Image (cartoon, helix red, strand yellow):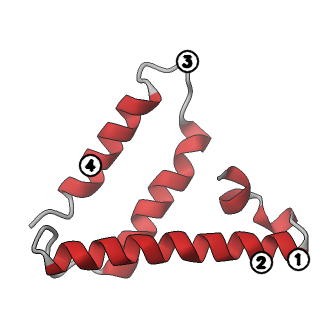
């Protein structure tokens, strides 16, 4: 993930194109999940899906930069807290 989201500029043209495709795929998946959640009235209808997807991906992609295994919380606990924070902000 660090390469796909942070070091992609240093990849060969072929691998850079592959990484860009992965990034688009992740964004599409999250966009679909959010749209489905809005339709099901799980998420607020006034959510700007594009910004929400960028916020979610930005949070997830930046986590490896600051997370430390030797820190106070396990990776699972950090994941749970991030998920709660992101999802709670989207609930209807």
Q: Quadrant of the C terminus?
A: bottom left
Q: Residue at x 29, y 81 (%)?
A: 48
Which callout, 1 or 4, points at the residue further toward the start of the chain? 1
Circle 2 residues within 10 Å: few <14, some 14–19, many ≥20: few
Residue picked out by circle 1? 13
Q: How far apart, in angstroms, are the residues tagged by discs 1 and 2?
A: 6 Å
The nearer-to-camera label among 1 and 4 is: 1
Residue beneath disc 4: 85
Q: Position of residue 69 (x, y in %)?
A: 55, 23
Which numbered mark, 2 or 4, is in the foreground of this view? 2
Q: Secondary structure at mark 1?
A: helix
Q: CA distance from mark 1 to mark 4?
A: 37 Å
Q: Is residue 44 left or right of residue 30?
A: left
Identify the residue shown where x is 49% and y is 60%.
58
Q: What numbered label is drawn on residue 17?
A: 2
Q: Which mark is residue 74?
A: none
Q: Could you tell whether 11 is left or right of 90 in the image? A: right
Q: Are marks 3 and 4 in contact (CB under 8 Å)?
A: no
Q: Residues within 10 Å of mark 3 (few under 14, many from 20)?
A: few
Q: Are marks 1 and 2 in contact (CB under 8 Å)?
A: yes
Local SS, label 2:
helix
The x, y position of residue 41, in whole percent, is 10, 74
Q: Position of residue 43 (x, y in %)?
A: 16, 69
């Amino acid at each position: 993930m660090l390469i796909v989201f942070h070091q992609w500029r240093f990849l060969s043209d072929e691998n850079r194109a592959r990484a860009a495709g992965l990034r688009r795929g992740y964004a599409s998946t999250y966009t679909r999940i959010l749209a489905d959640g809005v339709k099901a009235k799980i998420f607020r209808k006034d959510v700007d899906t594009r910004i929400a997807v960028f916020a979610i991906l930005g949070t997830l992609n930046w986590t490896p930069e600051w997370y430390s295994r030797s820190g106070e919380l396990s990776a699972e606990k950090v994941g749970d807290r991030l998920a709660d924070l992101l999802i709670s902000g989207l609930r209807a």
